[in-house]
Image: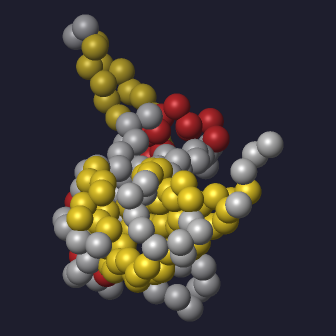
């Protein structure tokens, strides 16, 4: 029999309504979230989902940027979220913009269509799922904690450069 689990949402920077601004604060500071763990939490796991967006000024979408996740001041995961298999998803995104590009092979020049959806990106590809990073928190004790998320090289968003990160994090744990 499968164990019953609970979910504790911690953060979500995704814009849901037209009146909301895109979350571009990673270019300015570390995001911190305080939360508490009850003594009954067992098999605690942090699920972290991140995607970079915007191609302006190098952007957060098409340039590799480190994500640093810390718990109570200690780094628990540091990685560069990146997908280089986006071309394999083109069939799921047939409306992607395309343009001609010349390719030279064996001295011959040919023109091929390159699709925007073919380019590698910050942890997502048009038409694909984004798989969370799952971090086991075996040694976390009951009480108050602080989760910190930093993307030190995140680009500043301006009126003409729309760079941002969508990040969500939540805990799962077994209940008895």
> Can you say whether 9 is above or below 69 in the image?
below
What percent of the width, then of the height, locates residue 90? 56, 38
Camera-nearest residue between 34 and 96? 34
Q: Residue at x 38, y 58 (%)?
A: 139
For the view shown, which residue lies furthest in the right direction?
1
Specify whether 95 is left or right of 122: right
What percent of the width, then of the height, locates residue 165? 39, 68
Specify whether 44 is left or right of 50: right
> Can you say whether 165 is above or below 108 in the image?
below
Q: Quadrant of the C terminus?
A: bottom right
Q: Quadrant of the N terminus?
A: top right
Q: Residue at x 42, y 28 (%)?
A: 112
What percent of the width, then of the height, locates residue 37? 50, 74
Camera-nearest residue between 76 and 106? 76
Q: Residue at x 29, y 49 (%)?
A: 80
Specify whether residue 142 is in view.
yes
Specify whether residue 24 is in view.
no
């Amino acid at each position: 029999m499968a164990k019953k689990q609970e979910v504790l949402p911690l953060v979500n920077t995704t814009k849901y309504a037209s009146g909301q601004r895109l979350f571009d604060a990673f270019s300015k500071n570390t995001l911190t979230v305080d939360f508490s763990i009850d003594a009954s939490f067992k098999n605690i796991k942090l699920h972290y989902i991140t995607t970079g967006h915007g191609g302006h000024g190098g952007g957060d979408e098409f340039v590799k940027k480190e994500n640093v996740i810390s718990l109570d001041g200690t780094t628990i995961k540091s990685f560069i979220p990146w997908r280089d298999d986006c071309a394999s998803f083109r069939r799921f995104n047939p409306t992607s913009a395309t343009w001609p590009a010349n390719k030279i092979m064996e001295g011959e020049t040919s023109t091929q269509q390159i699709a925007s959806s073919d380019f590698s990106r910050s942890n997502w590809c048009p038409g694909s799922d984004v798989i969370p990073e799952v971090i086991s928190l075996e040694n976390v004790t009951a009480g108050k904690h602080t989760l910190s998320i930093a993307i030190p090289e995140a680009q500043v968003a301006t009126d003409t450069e729309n760079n941002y990160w969508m990040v969500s994090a939540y805990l799962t744990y077994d209940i008895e």
